[in-house]
Amino acid sequence: MIANVKDKAVIVGIGNTTFSKDSGVSELSLAVQAVKAAIDDAGLKPSDIDGMATFTMDNNDEIEVARALGVGELTFYGRSHYGGGAATSCLHQATMAIATGMAETVVVYRALNGRSGHRFSGGVAGDITTADAIHWGWYMPYGLLTPASWVAMFTQRWMHNTGVSKDALFEVAHSTRVYGANNPAAFFYGRNFDRAEYDAARMIADPLQLFDCCQESDGGSAVIVTTPERARDLKQPGVSVLGVAQCAADNQEQMTSFYREEFAGIPEMETAAKNVYAMSGLSVDDIDAAVIYDAFSPIVLWQLEAWGFCGYGESGDFVKDGALRTDGRLPTNTHGGQLSEAYIHGVNGIVEATRLVRGTSVNQPAKTVNHALVTSGVGIPTGGAILGKMD
Amino acid sequence: MTTDEQKAIESEIYAFIGQEVYPPTPAADDINEAMIRQWAEIMGDNNPAYLDKDWAAKSIRGTTISPPAMMYVWGQEGFQVTKGRALNAMSNLVSVFDKHGYTGVLGTNVKQEYFKEVNPGDNVTIEMIIDNISERKTTGRGTGYFFETLSTFTDQRGEKVGTQRFKVLKFIPQEQPSAVATEDKLDVPTRIASPRGHDNKWWWEACDDGKVLIQRCKSCQTLRHPPRPMCGECQSMEWDSIESTLDGEILSHTEIHHPKIPGYQYPLVCAVIKLAEGTNFVANIIGCSPSEVHIGMKVKGVLEQVDEKTMLPQFYPA
């Protein structure tokens, strides 16, 4: 059993920038806007921040964000690697720093010009010889160099193994877009979407079509995490981290773990799930709503299986009767997800999971949300967290 | 450049607009199968309409045709061009550009239009004029002018076969003038190569030499791919390698549709292949329609030069 940090850290502030396809500002500007919005939401001052956690992939140095905001002294800064796998890893870092007393109030942030600047769809390239660059070199010469193509390779085999069809992928794509259509901050706000449009959209990497893929986005998201003692005095109802874990599984590569005995699965998420449940003392039946990392539609299905909402290969049946919708078993990605709100590498998902527990989602389910699951990207070292109301 | 200099060159070059480069000139050889065969082989164009008489006899045309894109080929001078060409309006125009410092040359586009099919035994006549010259432009290569020739092709009956517009940029080279001074230095994009470091250089060098190797632990004989500095089973850092037979079976696959990256040939299929030796390997599947690729398919790999710079294993249906 890993260490238990249940109820040691509380989310007290959340902030998003406007999401767009061309922000017209620097990534640093987006980062400080998002962090400032989260600080304001919490009713704190920039100088209350003494720790920062972000992605290795983020281009905004902690000290630049701190200086621009007027944060002053930092006693903790830690970065998490592996692309979208870092989303809840940053929360994990923040929680550990607070639980150990290395910092009192930590901001988790991620900001990127993911559409107007460097685009993930542009693929990987490079002439550096780090272990990471050499890893991509086994795929680049063959043209297997975009996130969609890597995920497609897993999807093809998973669909072959399980018999799950595009109907299930469509249900994920559709349910999140219905949520997005009702979210003024989402790219899909006010937009109709149906099966005919889904089927007619261009193929990206077989079997993934356009609407199986997330939005390339410019924007930033941030959450403020602090101690329970501090949280009680602040403006918002505290949202406690009941469990959080990260995991890199055996024989792991970054997006290309093709060398496992059976590679159509996400064992790293299964381990993270087991540890989060153990830490929180909760089980799958206690989860009321979820924000499940959705860079691509099929990865939501695999995570439903990894977190035990259904067995391997059963997620198609699980979602087909509307389980992910607002009145379903597990309202999921109620902000529209990264498929239709914006792709802020999962940190906008932590923002939404916090809202679900506060009861302030734009698509708030009618039932009480005591426990919300939020996860990081898959195909990579990953993790997740369960959030709940602070006692 | 001053306005006076600009005026000076423009007064000279614009006088060439409309001038004849070649008067109507019949090709030295009639359209013939030998040249069509060579052209089709080089282009890799296996259209049976060009050379398969039996097929053509049953087609709506009833006979073979010359590849339309060959119309410019029939009037080429051949080996005698190595002794030099007679001066004409185009070479004179180029001399004017060169004299004013516009020594860079870049063929920017060719546009052909086809009106009529021609057959073996027909004869193509070409005539060419300087059709237009642009105003002064600033381009990525440097400041210059685009000029466009218009070639018109007719058959022996005087009927129009097609036209070709060829646009050329003459410009003042800005940097590395030698690199852009001739048309044959244009870079053709190639596939993105793997970086090569201590742990993988040996593998890619063997690939360059036509071999796919699999790293093997010298201590416990475990095979591992991709290569790593240490054996995960026994922690030995001693290793050698075996050569793969490249017999394999597809475990998963995807056809890459979007985005299309320069330097890659589409349709493009990538697959995870279980090699007969037991390790998994990612490569392209070629030699069949993408729709025929399936999980469980047996494949056989061959080392191939896929572009000017890249040797790669390519897998075919076994």
Image (cartoon, coloured by chain):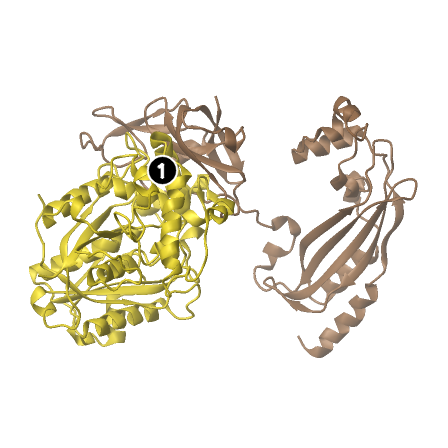
Is residue B103 visible in the rendered structure shown here?
no
Q: Is residue A113 above or below residue B294?
A: below
* Residue at x-position 80% and y-position 57%: B90
The colour with which the image depicts chain A is yellow
Question: What kind of element bears circle 1?
Answer: helix
In the figure, is residue A232 to the left or right of A200? left
User: Residue B172: horizontal and vertical position, in percent?
Assistant: 65, 65
Q: Quadrant of the C terminus of chain A?
A: bottom left
- In the image, what residue type sits under mark 1? Phe
Label 1 sits on residue: A154
The chain letter corresponding to brown is B
Observer-nearest of A133 and A258: A258
Q: Is residue B122 left or right of residue B200?
A: right
* Residue A41 sits in quarter: bottom left
Quadrant placement of the N terminus of chain A: top left
Residue B289 percent across, percent down from the top left? 54, 31
Q: Residues within 10 Å of mark 1 (few under 14, many from 20)?
A: many
Is residue B70 visible from the viewing direction of this image? yes
Quadrant in the picture for residue A208: top left
Residue A354: horizontal and vertical position, in percent? 22, 61
Q: Quadrant of residue B236?
A: top left
Nearer to me, B47 or A190:
A190
Question: Please, is residue A310 above or below residue B151 in the view?
Answer: above
